[in-house]
Image (cartoon, rainbow, N blue to C red):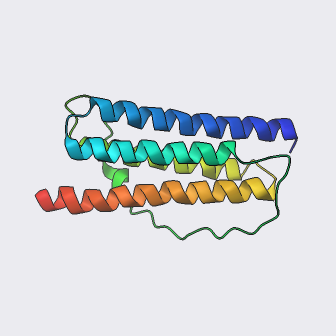
Amino acid sequence: MAHKQLKEIMDMAIQYETDASEFYATAADVAKDPSAKTLLKEFASIELKHKVKLENFNLDDVAHEHHTVPQTHDLHVSDYLMDKEITPDSTSQDIMVHAMKREQKAYEFYARMLKVVTSEDVKCLFEELAAEELEHKEKIETEYDDVVYKEN
């Protein structure tokens, strides 16, 4: 894969993480529920860290390190839930569902990019980011299960 194409993919990934961080920060300002605000701020921070990780990845000086990707599990809770736009009246449940859906889309983005990139170093980076997105989704799904299903 040409360096130019790889740079374009990295730029897309950086933009994806920037958009996610900005979305969560804006949603945190909109949400009224204190626990929802906290959750959204946490996700804004996490996505910003992903952006920085991507920005700091030097395509010209790739190291040939082996990365261990943590095992994560997709509980598939969000597969059966309807996504809603975040508004000032959104509940913690609404926000968690939306966050699950966003994390699933982020995971799918990195999984698709893994099929496109040829650099082993970039593949390792995208594997790590895909695993982190799935880990975030798992965290939200677990919290959703603990909070929502216990309330109902």
Give left or right: position of 34 versus 19. Answer: left
Q: Which residue is at a point 38% across and 60% down the rendered structure image? A: 139
Q: Position of residue 38 (x, y in %)?
A: 30, 46
Q: Position of residue 3 (x, y in %)?
A: 86, 40
Q: Position of residue 34 (x, y in %)?
A: 21, 42
Closest to the observer, 150 or 11: 11
Q: Which residue is at a point 63% across and 38% down the rendered structure image? A: 14
Q: Can residue 98 be seen?
A: yes
Image vertical order of residue 49 relative to residue 9, above or below: below
Quadrant containing the N terminus in the rendered view: top right
Quadrant containing the C terminus in the rendered view: bottom left
Q: Residue furthest left?
A: 152
Total tally of numbered discs in the picture: 0
Q: Quadrant of residue 70?
A: bottom right
Image vertical order of residue 13 relative to residue 129, above or below: above
Give left or right: position of 17 versus 83. Answer: right
Q: Which residue is at a point 66% across and 53% down the rendered structure image? A: 126
Give left or right: position of 151 versus 32. Answer: left
Q: Which residue is at a point 52% across and 42% down the rendered structure image? A: 48
Q: Position of residue 63 (x, y in %)?
A: 82, 60
Q: Quadrant of residue 23?
A: top left
Q: Can residue 85 be seen?
A: no
